[in-house]
Each structure stands twice: as structure tokens, then as C-alpha cells.
Amino acid sequence: MQAELIEIRNHMVQHAPFDELPTEMMDKVVAGIEITYFQAGTDILELGQNNNYLHYVRSGAVEIFRRSGELYNRVTEGEIFGQIGLMMNRTVRFPARAIEDTLVYQIPFELFQYLLQSEEFTDFVEIEDRSRLRSANSRREKSNQLMTAKVTRLINRAPVIVPNTVRLQEAARVMTEHGVSALPLMDESGDKPRLCGIVTDRDLRTRALTHALPSETPISDIMSTDVTTTHSNAFIFEAMLTMLHNNVHHLPVMDGDTVRGVIALSDIIKHESQSSLYLVSNIYHQHDVKGLKKLSKDVPDTFVRMVNEDANSHMIGSAMAGIGRSFSQRLLELGEEKLGPPPVPYCFMALGSMARDEQLVVTDQDNAMVLDDSFIPEEHDAYFKALAKFVSDGLAECGYTYCTGDIMATNDKWRQPLKVWKEYFADWIDNPKAEALLNSNIFFDLEGIYGETRFTDELQEFVAKRASGNPRFLAMMARNALGRTPPLGFFRQFVMEEDGKHNKTFNLKRRGTAPMSDLIRIHALACGSRAQNTFNRLKAIGATELIPEDGVDNLRDAFEFIAIVRIRHQALAIEAGRKPDNNVRPEDLSPFERSHLKDAFQVVNQAQKFLRFRYNAGAVRNA
């Protein structure tokens, strides 16, 4: 092959979809390419004209327009245009004009048809930018068995179940005879049996043997009645997240009211190589902060294993949040052992990424305490201040750095009775000044992770009702959210930092996932949703007519892609022995990632424009 043709091929195979095509196909295509130069301002394709070429931009920039003349897209180096017209009678549907001096590789129609023999190429050109994001996300997830395998794959025997009327000795005999570590218990007093409880081998040890209960004790006396279950149609990853979130080791699998089987922690550990559940289990076996600190060194490896197994961002974020939540819960248990029982009921509240189930390895502490309204500062606060310090110092030992903004339970302001928290939220919503808006972005992602979690349930309900009924607050939130824009310039070029240690990079959290979390939170508040996780918020928004139907899908795909590129960036840093961060250099990304990140950032741009329009954010003024 001539040197010129080799140079053309080497350039094209750096960009999607040509990076996935076989060498022999690319050689044939490159041999038939025609090279054309267009000066800035020149029309390349005119509406309705006949077109016989797929266009590949070698250098320069091209604007694509709709029939109405409205700007539709901008394409730059390594991108293609003209494919839609080729697939529709070779008639131009989207006019194109060079906005810079532009060099184009033109691929004749016959070779375009030849390329369509490739499934990868066909998938790429048959769908538009935002659908390509969906295709990219789907293709990656299909390679992960945890994402595609149903939980029933882990069930290898019929369920062993007994009525809740059996005695302790009989239950133990059944479990021993069948070799099971958990026994679902059925209430047979109604028209049809229903699951009413579960007893595990641990229950037998801690609740029966330890207290020397008689063998004739009803099993219902020691069973757990608040049973966490999953449905037989659930995927394995969903079962894994359920076990992480609820800290359970046995999960009944249900078909309606019928117990299909019981899966154990060990079943998922055997099935998956990312041992996040195993790590969580070990956290609760540690007896001091020293043991927790030693165990925390396994967290980065767990994160990397999940990334390398192609888990999606929701699964990784939930698993890492589950690990962080478990460290907090175990520290609270150790703190209570050291300080004694709390003088009044309380709830330890997680904020930010942990509350959203979107935590990664680069994270700090964001937490608070909600105390019972019987709290008397002079009598009780010394205990809770000491407990908060024990937990915060312990988390810091385990790699969760102190919050630079002091959003921690060690701050007296964030250790308050439930009634005071309601006053806080009411004031932030009713008087949305600058500080209130800042607090709203932090505290409106909240979850109770220990103690009286009903306190945070009340707060979530309070916020959902009050915020949805306050258009001015939503408008101020929307205006505030527009301050963080994606790093995409007018010509679809990445906009990067120009000074400091992060020169020539862009921040995938501050300029990517954070703006998306902000705008999705606002829509969720507007529709009265109590959901905290971004994907769950999108589901709640989709159930309304708040935004156009395809808008929810576009946001979901864009958020997933930006999040997974950010996650991979951190994993690569860990594997290379570097400190992970959120600052990415475009040259470190693959052509596939660069192209699809631009698609995702365009979605964010459009979503922010809609946010401004939907909440009239341009007209609102600060209080």
C-alpha cells in the first residue's frame, strides 16, 4: 500500500466506527477514497441535492443544518456526515457548510454499501448522536454477566421452607438436614401462605443458643420479620445492590407470593469476581479502627476489579457507597460500644454521593446527625459530639477525608433535632439566597444510614412536598445550576483549564456529572420525587410529562457515559500507581471516548437550555 494511503488509514482507524473494522475492509475503503478541499464558508451539501459520498473530516470543521436552517450539529476531525441521505435515496436531508478550511475524505456510495456489511459500522451510522450513546453503553454492559444474568441463575435447589409455627428444635433440624443457612417462614393462617419471616444460622447462634432458649420456643420468637426480598426477574447486579444497601446475607427470591429460592452472600461472591459484598461482610467483623483501616486498603482494588469487569456506573457507584456506608455503620457501632447507648434516639445521615449511591474512590465525608426532638443540648450533646468525632476521625483513617466545607456531624450546626432540620429546609426553600442554594445542592441528597432512619424519611417527604410547590425556589436552583457548563466549545472542541496544575485538562466531575446531577435534582424536586439516586430520579421524572419523553433517555445515556469515562480514568490511575482524580486530558482518551463524550456534553448543553426555559431561570433575581 502506498505511503499516502497508509497515512489515511492510520488516521481513520483512530476514530469510531472505523476503529472496530477489520484491516482488509479498511484497506479496500481507503483505496477508493477521494480527497476534497473546501474553503471556509463553502456549501458542501445542499438540501435536496443528490449525494454519492460519505464524508469524513480529516481537518477543519463543518456545520450541519436542519431543513429549517436551524443549526443541528458541528463535526470536526475524525467525524462523519452525510450518512442519513445515503440511506434515504441518496438525497441530502441535512445541509452541510465548511466553517473552517476543511479537508474531507469522500467515501463513494458503493464503498459505503460495502461498509454496511459490518455490524459495528451499521450500528454506528443508523442512529444519531444520542442514540449512539445508548448503543455504546449497551454494548459495554452486554459483556458483563452481572448485568445480563437473572438472579434465578444462582438458585440451584428447591426452597426449603417451614410454617412460622414450628419450634426452635424442629427448625434447626430442618436446616441441618437440608444443609441450608437460612429458612424462610410462612404464615399459613390465611387463604394462601405468605412469607412472614426468615431465620438464619446466625439467628440461631445469637438469639437462641446465646440466651439458652428452650427447644420448644416458637421459631417466630427469634425470626426477622422485616424481610428484604428480590423478584425472580431481577438481574444478579440488582440482587447484589439490594444486599449491599440493606446489609443482608440471605435474600429470598420471589414469584409474587411464592418463594422461588434463597440466595446467599456466598452465591454472588462465587459468581462475581468484584468482591464488594465480601469486603462489606468483613467490615462488620472488625473490632477496632485499626482493623477497619487495614481493610480499607482493599477498596481501590475492589473498585478496579468492578471496572475491569465492565460493571456500569450505577452498579459501581452503589457498591462503593455501600462500602462507605458500611464503614460508617461499623464505626457508629464501635462508638456506641465505647461511649455507651445514646441518651436519645438519633439518625446518622449520609449526604451527597453516598446518599445518591454514586460514590467513587475520590471522595470526602459529607454527613450529619438528626436527633430526636426530645434532645436537650446541655444534657445530651456532649455524647453526640464525641460520637461524631469518633466516626469522623475513623472515616479519615479509612481514606474518607474530612470535608473541607465542614459538612460533617462534628459541626454543631449539622447535629440538630428533627424539628430544627425541618426549619433549615423550610428556610432554604422559602428564602433561596446564595448560601441556601449551596446548602440545597448538598443537603437535598440525603439518606439515613444508621439509627432511626424514619427521621430522614420524614425529611425527604418534607422536602419533596415543599420544594415542588415553590416555583421561585426551583427557578433559583435552575439559575444556580446553569453556572457549571460542560467543557465543549462552539466548534465541538473540548474547553480545557488554562492554568495551574490541571492545565490542558477538563474535570469530568465538576464539568460533567455534577451539572447533570444538579439539573436532574431540580426536575426531581419539581415533580415531588423522594428518589435520591440520579437514575431513580430520572425514572420518576419519566413517569411525568415534566420534560419531553426522549429527554429522559438522552439524559440517562449521557450521564452513564460521562460517569463511566470518569470511573475508568480513576481506575487507570490506580493501576498505574497514581493518585486518582477527575481531571482528564483529551489525548489520554480513546477516539471512541472523545467522540461519545462530545455527544454526551451536547446532551448536557441542550438539557441546560431546557432548564433555563422550563423554570424561567433567566428572569429570576436573587432575594
Image (cartoon, rainbow, N blue to C red):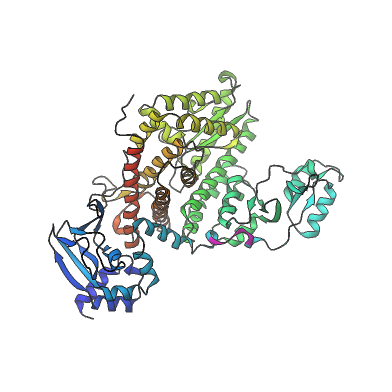
Q: Which residue ends up furthest to the bottom in the rendered image?
A: 1
| Quadrant position of residue 173 | bottom right
Residue 251 or residue 303, whichever sits in front = 251
Count the labels in the image.
0
Q: Is residue 491 left or right of residue 291?
A: left
Work out whether residue 419 can be spotted.
yes
Quadrant of the image containing the C terminus? top left
Residue 593 spot, x, y in % from top left: 35, 59
Residue 443 spot, x, y in % from top left: 46, 34
Q: The magenta stretch spans which residues? A: 148-152
Residue 151 located within the stretch drawn in magenta = yes
Q: Residue at x 40, y 60 (%)?
A: 136
Quadrant of the image containing the N terminus? bottom left
Q: Residue at x 29, y 58 (%)?
A: 587
Q: Residue at x 34, y 62 (%)?
A: 592
Q: Is residue 528 left or right of residue 496?
A: right
Residue 177 or residue 53, whichever sits in front = 53
Residue 556 spot, x, y in % from top left: 43, 50
Q: Is residue 98 left or right of residue 434?
A: left
Work out whether residue 579 can be spotted.
no
Residue 464 or residue 213, whichever sits in front = 464
**350 is higher (above) or lower (below) than 96:** above
Residue 452 spot, x, y in % from top left: 61, 33
- What secondary structure characterizes most of the magenta part? helix
**283 is higher (above) or lower (below) than 146:** above
Residue 317 located within the stretch drawn in magenta = no
**164 is higher (above) or lower (below) than 265:** above
